[in-house]
Image (cartoon, helix red, strand yellow):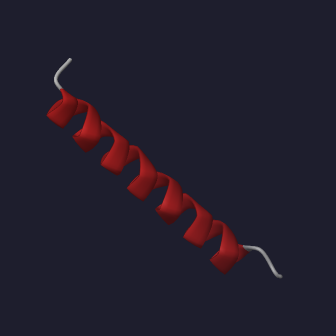
Amino acid sequence: MSKRFAYVVLMFVSSSCIKYLLLLLVFLPT
């Protein structure tokens, strides 16, 4: 794997995690 490909995958995974956490914050009463 190239470092650039690994960086793109890491960014994609972190953005997906952020979206999931935002959905949890929206739907769960805190």
Q: Say which residue appears at 64% left-offset and 79% top-offset.
A: 26
Measured as percent of width and height from the top left, residue 14 is found at 44, 52
Say whether residue 3 is left or right of residue 10: left
Say whether residue 19 is left or right of residue 1: right
Q: Say which residue appears at 36% left-offset and 42% top-offset.
A: 10
Measured as percent of width and height from the top left, residue 1 is found at 21, 17
Say whether residue 8 is left or right of residue 15: left
Q: Quadrant of residue 7?
A: top left
Say whether residue 12 is left or right of residue 8: right
Find the residue positioned furthest to the front: 3
Q: Say which residue appears at 33% left-offset and 48% top-offset.
A: 12
Classify the position of the C terminus by image quarter.
bottom right
Relative to 10, say whether 1 is above or below: above
Q: Say which residue appears at 33% left-offset and 50% top-offset.
A: 11
Find the residue positioned furthest to the top: 1
- Counting the numbered discs, the total is 0
Measured as percent of width and height from the top left, residue 18 is found at 50, 62
Residue sitting nearer the eye, 21 or 14 = 14
Relative to 8, say whether 18 is above or below: below
Measured as percent of width and height from the top left, residue 9 is found at 30, 38
Relative to 13, say whether 24 is above or below: below
